[in-house]
Image (spheres, rainbow, N blue to C red):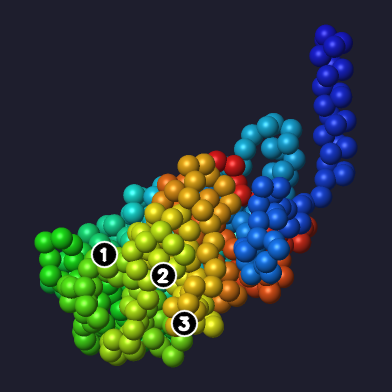
Amino acid sequence: MNLARLFRRAAAAVLVALLAGCMQAPIAPTTARGADLVYPPPPEEARFVYERTIYGSADVIAPESGDDLRRLVTGEGQKSEGLSKPYAVAVHRGRVFVSDSAQRYIRVFDFPAGRFYKIGEEEPGRIVKPLGIDVDASGTLYVADITARDVKVFSPEGRFLRAIGGAKWFDRLSSVTVDPRGERLYVVDIGGVGSENHRVRAFDARTGGHLFDIGRRGAGPGEFNLPRDLAIGKDGRLYVVDGGNFRVQVFSRDGQFLRSFGALGKQFGQFARPKEIATDASGNVYVVDSAFGNFQIFSPEGELLLFVGERSERDGPGKYMLPSGIYVDEDGRVYMVDQWFRKVDVFRPVTLAAGQGHLRRAARASAAPVAAPAPAAR
């Protein structure tokens, strides 16, 4: 046998043994580019910190024992099923649901269980083209299917339960919002240029019975021009993104107009292309603006508090080209979807310690849970 080849094999075996003896699973890895990204930046008091980015299945599936060593020696990357055209996001106790309008199903990143799965691929309940999604306090999933023109309801594990609505009820539904108890469902019908049905339709979430409608096409108080999304805030108030009128309108739980805020413009607190909306436990309102490449945070009364993110042609933490969906989970974490960069950025409130709350990756063999994994390589 060639002595040089034999020496190289022996040296490699020694290196592998040394690495195996010294290697430890990383705990709470961070990235230099995002580890210190806080909002607002110094010298202001920080409110949110960038925590992680979800690109695909590798960001949630815990590697099996030996995977790190094998990749180190062979140079191979971790396999991951990435997002194609994500639109909306909803979260329940660390289980992250993302609608994908190109692949036509819901991707589920179950961080506590360390698993990845899909919902809506098969009959019954096959999804045609999902847009807006939401979950109730039990984790039941509601999906606005723009092509089927209905709302499909699934158990947290993906079992189809029922469909609400249908072709006669909607022209072009864009989003769905359910109250925490899973009793009332609000579905936004964006209508379209040739339709007068720019409105919000309310249903009984359990029986599917129609309850009432909010709004009609127009620019006056309580009227809509291409409404996009709805969020339920403090005291059951409804916050509706009125896209074509560049504002957010506020209604009572039963649809009575209360007030509006926002206007067309480039200044803070104004809108250029508002899309989805979310609220937190304090009633603050989060509005995505696709043109600005950020989300703005308002008080329940519509006072601007903070904005997060910036428009960019290059991907990175807090950088967006085509943002769409947003969600605030039980712990106050904010999830922001960008369709162009095919990702979900996660921001943690500074009042929540790293590694706390529901969003933690499952422990790998003989290792502690990883609290904040770095973004997966794309």
Going by the numbered disc 1, the residue's amino acid type is Gly
Residue 374 appears at what percent x and percent y? 65, 51
- In the picture of the structure, the residue carrying the numbered disc 3 is 300
Q: Circle 2: is it few (<14), some (14-19), or many (20+) Cα within 10 Å?
A: many
**Going 22% across and 87% down the picture, which residue do you hit?**
211
Mark 3 falls on what kind of element?
loop
Is residue 246 something that shows in the picture?
A: yes
Going by the numbered disc 2, the residue's amino acid type is Ile
- In the picture of the structure, the residue carrying the numbered disc 1 is 244
Picture layout, residue 340 above or below residue 345? above
Residue 78 appears at what percent x and percent y? 61, 42
**Going 39% across and 54% down the picture, which residue do you hit?**
291
Q: Earlier in the sequence, mark 3 or mark 1?
A: 1
Separation (CA) of disc 3 from disc 1: 22 Å
Q: Is residue 2 left or right of residue 220?
A: right
Q: Earlier in the sequence, mark 2 or mark 1?
A: 1
Check the picture and name the quadrant holding the C terminus. Answer: top right
Picture layout, residue 298 above or below residue 291? below
Mark 2 falls on what kind of element?
strand
Say whether marks 3 and 2 touch (CB < 8 Å). no
